[in-house]
Image: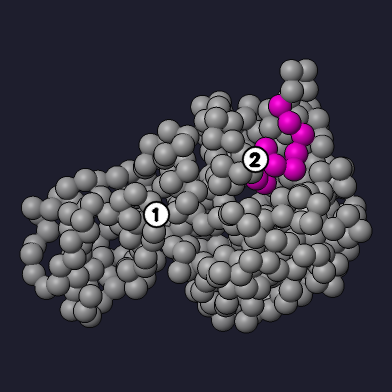
Amino acid sequence: MTSIGTTYRNGAIFDGTRLHDGSAVRFENGILTAFGPDADVARHGDEVDLGGDTLAPGYVDLQVNGGDGIMFNDDPSVETLRRIASAHRRLGVAALLPTLITDTAEKTRDAIAAAIDARRAEIPGIAGLHLEGPHLSIERKGAHDPDLIRPMEPDDLDALLAAAAALPVLKVTVAPENVTEAQVRALAAAGALVSLGHTDASYETCRRYFAAGARCVTHLFNAMSQLGNREPGLVGATLADGTVSSGLIADAVHVHPETMRTAWAAKTGPGRIFLVSDAMAVAGTDCTEFTLGGRRIRRKDGILTLQDGTLAGADLDLTTAVRTLVEHVGVPVDAALQAATSIPAALAGIPPLVLKPGASLQRDMIRLARDFTSVTSLA
């Protein structure tokens, strides 16, 4: 690649919505100057033979707990966010929401301040903030520290409303057990993306909270009331309600492929299922263990667990998640790529990467191996 220009041919081009075979795309000084059928894109300057690989906009990941050997909870600072974003950029992520797992009120304030400062500093990849807790259900705590889970108080709500005003994206995962419908309405009115998760709430309760303004569900099937024969739970409410979308950890560990296949077919629109990594400190590293709130988490065979065997986030990147959807769930490639790019971007209000002449896109484009086993950035 040179500063004069580079044309990419002999592969598939994903434009955020669909795949284009037999097409080519050209960049000059990082700006897209031509995109269309191969025969219509002039042959001059440098050329790259994709060899059947796919070019796509970089991923959008709305749930990233850590990377580069560090958790956001360890040190919620601008430098931590810089390291995490850089690690995930190497994994193909163009935009992410750093995620603070249930912690103290002081740590939550620090996380909000760090995200605001990172945006001001224009740290590449940091799109906003995701607060997963502390207002969750003890019964569905997962790897969250039960001693830190608590109800949302007026001071908490005020801090979140201020954060929603200061950040382009504020996602908050809450449970009806510890958050009221009035609080959800206030957050939604302020522009926050309210997500239900880590809850044992009933189907009817979840539908009420959707009506109050919750538009998202955190890691479908995990840490929530399940779909039963007489009580559909949060899973059933999510699949039935077209106003909400849901993240999915597609590693074939958190959710069985056949369960994913059923959910994919059953989901009522226009809400959609999208992919999240739920990545922890090990992302982008060879680390075999790390700590979360003083608790040791082990990495073995692609699985992260506490000492009691509880799943503790995921050892997953979105290229692997796309491959899981395509190879094991039977999702078409373009739909799987949408779930990792345009769907989460639209839900969070992150500006989409549109492949059209004049767009400054090259640094945010990725090249996916034809078998989805690796990813590289064009920049």
- What residue is drawn where x is 63% and y is 27%? 240
Q: Secondary structure at mark 1?
A: loop
Rendering coords of residue 225 (x, y %): 77, 34
Q: Vertically, is 137 above or below 75?
A: above
Q: Quarter of the image for the N terminus: give it.
A: bottom left
- What residue is drawn where x is 55% and y is 30%? 258
Magenta residues: mostly which secondary structure? loop
Asked where in the image residue 34 lies, by quadrant, the reply is bottom left
Residue receiving disc 2: 220
Q: Is residue 185 something that shows in the picture?
A: no
As for residue 222 lying within the magenta part, the answer is yes
Using the image as rendered, state which of residue 368 and residue 41 is in the foreground: 368
- Dot 2: few (<14), some (14–19), or many (≥20) neighbours within 10 Å? many
Q: Amino acid at mark 2?
A: Leu
Using the image as rendered, state which of residue 120 and residue 58 is in the foreground: 58
- Dot 1: few (<14), some (14–19), or many (≥20) neighbours within 10 Å? few
Quote the CA–CA distance across marks 1 and 2: 24 Å
Q: Are marks 1 and 2 in contact (CB under 8 Å)?
A: no
- What residue is drawn where x is 71% and y is 27%? 227
Please give the range of residues in magenta.
215-227
Q: Which mark is residue 12?
A: none
Of mark 1 and mark 2, the one earlier in the sequence is 2
Rendering coords of residue 64 (x, y %): 61, 61
As for residue 327 lying within the magenta part, the answer is no
Q: In this view, which residue lies farthest toward the top?
A: 230
Left or right, 80 with respect to 37, comes to right
Q: Is residue 110 something that shows in the picture?
A: yes
Asked where in the image residue 153 lies, by quadrant, the reply is bottom right
Q: Secondary structure at mark 2?
A: loop
Residue receiving disc 1: 373
Using the image as rendered, state which of residue 342 and residue 200 is in the foreground: 200
